[in-house]
Image (cartoon, helix red, strand yellow):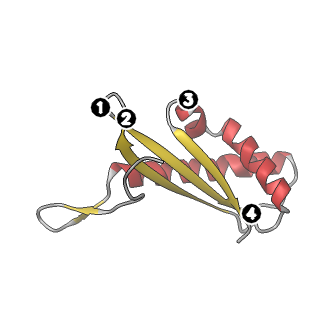
Amino acid sequence: MLGRPPGRATASRLRHPVTDPEQLFAVGYAACFHSALRVVARQQKADVSDSAVGAKVELGSLDDGGFGLAVELEVTLPNVDHETAQKLTEAAHQVCPYSNATRGNIEVTLTVTDD
């Protein structure tokens, strides 16, 4: 991952809380990935009720002086075994529009949890 704490909230000079672009990207990616996961699960007749997807997005410096993102998607599928959860997650990563848009451009780590 890159070199900044994920999902960092900031405040303006007026002391009003603001949402930074990394948080917005994280929310959009997590929601989109969760939809893709449900589509894949429906096709494979897998129970993804009570599932959850979270995203951590980090902003960091690139070697060329620019800036880049790194993403960790955390997927929780409590109603399927770990192997099935991993396969569903990988399949969702192939059909998710955010994953397709970012593939080859940013580091994306998929983590399947049992919680």
Structural crowding at the residue carrying mark 4, measured as other residues with C-alpha within 10 Å and reported as few (<14), some (14–19) or many (≥20): many
Name the disc covering residue 77, or none.
4
In this view, which residue lies farthest toward the left?
Answer: 14
Give the amino acid at mark 4: Leu
**Image quadrant in which you'd find residue 82:** bottom right
Which of the 4 image quadrants contains residue 61? top left
- Horizontally, is 103 left or right of 59 in the view? right
Q: Position of residue 8 (x, y in %)?
A: 35, 61
Q: Is residue 8 toward the left or the right of residue 73 in the image?
A: left
Q: Residue 65's mark?
A: 1
Q: Which comes sooner in the sequence, label 2 or label 3?
A: 2
Q: 10 Å neighbourhood of mark 1: few (<14), some, or many (≥20)?
A: few
- 25 displayed left or right of 61: right
Residue 104: mark in rendering: 3
Label of residue 62 in the image: 2
Specify the amino acid type for callout 3: Gly
Q: Earlier in the sequence, mark 4 or mark 2?
A: 2
1 or 3: mark nearer the eye: 1
Q: Tell which circle, 4 or 3, labels the residue nearer the N-terminal end.
A: 4
Q: Residue at x 70, y 72 (%)?
A: 115
Residue 21 screen position, x and y as percent: 35, 49
Q: Are marks 2 and 1 in contact (CB under 8 Å)?
A: yes
- Amino acid at circle 1: Gly
